[in-house]
Amino acid sequence: MEDMAQTTLTVQLRELERDGILCRQIYAESPPRVEYKLSELGKTLLPVIDMLDSWWISYKSEVK
């Protein structure tokens, strides 16, 4: 996702955290570090994500 601005990414990650899809872990280091992982609710989306990935592999040549 090389074209995504840092602020856009941050907003999206915070929204996913707010919605319970992601969990955020903040590390008190220098420089500060944050890690995101799927929550239990987020893990229920894995079959859907796998289906989208399969669809993309099959049809990416047809997408403009």
Image (cartoon, rainbow, N blue to C red):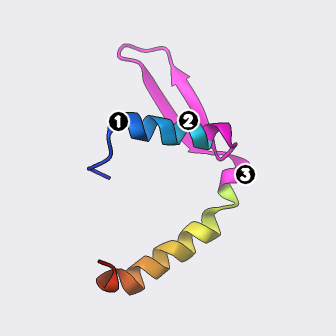
Q: Nearer the viewer, residue 40 or 2?
A: 2
Labels 1 and 2 touching (C-beta < 8 A)? no
Q: Describe residue 20's horizontal placement relative to residue 54 as left or right.
A: right
Task: Please give the range of residues in magenta.
Answer: 17-42
Q: Is residue 32 above or below residue 38?
A: above
Quadrant of the snapshot with the C terminus: bottom left
Q: Describe residue 48's horizontal placement relative to residue 53 as left or right.
A: right
Disc number placed over residue 15 in the picture, else none: none
The type of residue carrying mark 3 is: Leu
Query: Which residue, given by chain and number where applicable, does mark 3 sit on?
Result: 41
Residue placed at 49% from the left, 36% from the top? 11
- Expressed as whole percent of the image width and height from the top left, the position of residue 40 reads 72, 49
Secondary structure found at label 3: helix
Q: Nearer the viewer, residue 61 or 57?
A: 61
Q: Nearer the viewer, residue 37 or 55?
A: 55
Q: Is residue 56 above or below residue 43?
A: below
Q: Is 2 a magenta residue?
A: no
> In the image, which is nearer the foreground, mark 1 or mark 3?
1
Q: Is residue 44 above or below residue 35?
A: below
Disc number placed over residue 14 in the picture, else none: 2
> Dot 1, how many residues are within 10 Å of its Cα: few (below 14), some (14-19), or many (20+)?
few
- Expressed as whole percent of the image width and height from the top left, the position of residue 6 reads 35, 35
**Quarter of image, res 15:** top right
Query: Which residue, given by chain and number where applicable, does mark 1 sit on?
Result: 6
Residue placed at 43% from the left, 24% from the top? 33
- Expressed as whole percent of the image width and height from the top left, the position of residue 7 reads 39, 33
- Expressed as whole percent of the image width and height from the top left, the position of residue 51 reads 56, 76
The type of residue carrying mark 2 is: Arg
